[in-house]
Image: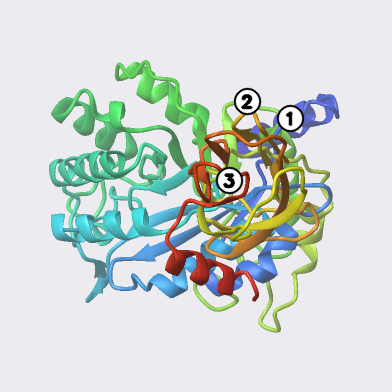
Amino acid sequence: MLYYMKYFLFLLFFLLLPTNIFAVNIFGVHLSDTNDIIKAAPIINSNGGDWGYATVVIRSDLLSRQMWQDFLDICREFHITPIIRLSTILENDHWKKPEYSDIDAMASFLNSLNWPHKKQIVILFNEPNHGSEWGGGVDVKNFVDITTYTAQKLKTLSQNFYILSTGLDLAAPSKLPEFESATNFYQQVITYKPDYFDNIDGLSHHYYPNNSSRNFIWELNLLKRLGIKKELPIFITETGFKNVKTSGKLLANYFNLWSGDKRIQAVTPFIFNYPYPPFDQFSWLDIAGNLNYGYQKLVSIPKQKNVVDQINSYKVVFTHLPFIIFPNTVYHSVVELQNTGQAIWGEKQFCLKANSSSNVSLSDLCVDPIVKTIPHKTQKISFSFEIKSASESAYISWETLPKYDLSLLSPNSTIYHPNTSLWSYVKEWWSGLF
């Protein structure tokens, strides 16, 4: 009865909320397979949304560069922010306890990938207050040692890694070694390592209302009582109701409430596509691959567009310049740039400002706003220049790019040529033809 009274009060509060308060897109899903991202993407960013979220598990024995880079590239293309949860492998009836060598391998692997944007979100494993999730028995000290090492290792490799704490089962009893309650688990973590949360950027929260009324507010208040003063953004990386017929409607009500709370950054309900026991009652898709009717209400919720910060970088593949350059003549040439960043050129338009000697007129170097160039691909960009008057030296360049010196053929000449070896020039000229 108490649960239903709380739910009624929640609905009443929701109905009283203004409709224009939702500032960010928290919407997302939890995937069981990276291959589901293409089907999930239009649902994640449905009804006006952009850069929604997808939580997915990476196992220590499945570090395939092609698989994971393909997944991240699709996330980039469809504007999805990935949340990657670390995992090991199943041994008998439990998940193997991670070793330091596992951490080193996974951290280096994740750092080698080209993520969709700067915020590279990683969850430190899963529900360690279940013994089955941590080598067969709850082991708080080992968990703290391993996850602290993991967070520090990732941050050492790149400050772009955004570390989420491990989601706990808030309904777990204290029954060692199989289970430990969330309260006791957190108490032991902080007793053993008081500064544990210094290495954490956000809180991964699991919320299953059928199992427990304890929500993220309860979890945050518990951490405050234990002395944690740090403000931790909330990522609800697992949630759902164990009833496929009503789950979508109930989740839609919760989504509308959560969207009005600035502490909540993302919500990725469990699970998008697993229409088989034991998770068939949570699955958004049925066994035929169709969206279960109840979840259409979630898709129909108006959503916002998130703004992400992407690395925009490039390198010169070649610069095509005429071998002979006459003053007072406009030349049209080409620079080929390789996209070495995270952004897709064409979605992101930019120009490199011209930088030349005072006797040269040079156009800016601007990527084509129509042509889409994904990372690792190249784009040939046209530019024009003119030497206005002959002098001892001339050069052309653009911000952050190398300087190209233009030299006189002889001290008394007024004709220029690129200051490069003939062989280098021939190779660049030949490349420019194709």
Look at mark 1 in the image and give the residue it sits on: 23
Identified by mark 3, the residue type is: Ser
User: 353 or 376, which lies in front?
Assistant: 353
Q: Distance between the residues labelled 1 and 2?
A: 8 Å
Q: Distance between the residues labelled 3 and 1?
A: 64 Å
Identify whether 269 is placed above or below 398: below
Look at mark 2 in the image and give the residue it sits on: 262
Rendering coords of residue 191 (x, y %): 17, 26
Q: In which quarter of the image is residue 303?
A: top right
Labelled pair 3, 1 in contact (Cβ < 8 Å) = no
Q: Residue at x 21, y 65 (%)?
A: 96
User: 84 or 188, which lies in front?
Assistant: 84
Q: Residue at x 20, y 55 (%)?
A: 104
**Under tag 3, what secondary structure?**
loop
Identified by mark 2, the residue type is: Lys
Identify whether 36 is placed above or below 114: below
Label 1 Cα crowd, 10 Å radius (few <14 / some 14-19 / many 20+): some
Q: How far apart are marks 2 and 3 (CA)?
A: 68 Å
Q: Give the quarter of the figure containing the N terminus.
A: top right
Q: Can residue 334 be seen in this view?
A: yes
Q: In this view, does 405 lie to the left or right of 350?
A: left
**Under tag 2, what secondary structure?**
loop
Which badge, 3 or 1, is on the more N-terminal residue? 1
Q: In this view, does 303 lie to the left or right of 96?
A: right
Q: Quadrant of residue 352?
A: top right
Rendering coords of residue 194 (x, y %): 20, 23
Identified by mark 1, the residue type is: Ala
Mark number displayed over residue 413: 3
